[in-house]
Image (tube, rainbow, N blue to C red):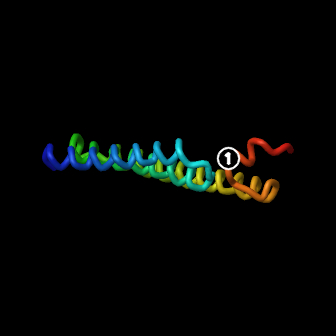
Amino acid sequence: MNNTELNRILIVSALLFFIGVYGFLTRRNMITMLMAVEIMLNSVTINFVAFNKYLYADKMDGLFFTIFIITIAAAEAAVAIAIIINLYRNFNSIDINDSATMKY
């Protein structure tokens, strides 16, 4: 992998990360906010794989970190979806503004 390929991969990863940040900050639906966090985690895994291949092609450290991040993302998504379902059952809405103003 040469330097221009790494630069292109890092540009795509940065774009994905900032799309995720934008989606997290501008959306008020909890599911779209969860998807934005998942996009940010995917951009980080792209960075780990790219730097692992560029710097240490014979080692697998970046790939192990990637598998760890994917595992954490799956667990985070399962817990977040359970919380979102519980909020929807109680408030009949998954909008952040609606659930913040309702009383328990």
- Quarter location, residue 93: bottom right
Does residue 39 appear to the left or right of 85 in the view shown?
A: left
- In this view, the residue in front, 10 or 61, is 10
Residue located 45% across and 51% down the image: 39
Find disc 1 in the rendering and name its residue: 96
Residue 82, how many percent across, how many down?
70, 56
Residue 54, how many percent across, how many down?
21, 44
- In this view, the residue in front, 54 or 93, is 93
Does residue 52 appear to the left or right of 66 in the view shown?
A: left
- In this view, the residue in front, 65 or 39, is 39
Residue located 85% across and 43% down the image: 103
Residue 30, how many percent across, how many down?
63, 51
- Report the label total: 1
Residue 97, how many percent across, how many down?
69, 45
Answer few, some or many: residues within 10 Å of disc 1's Cα (few below 14, many 20 plus, some between 14 and 19). few
Quarter that holds the C terminus: top right
Secondary structure under the numbered disc 1 in the rendered image: helix
Q: Residue furthest right?
A: 104
Q: Amino acid at mark 1?
A: Ile
Residue located 65% across and 56% down the image: 81
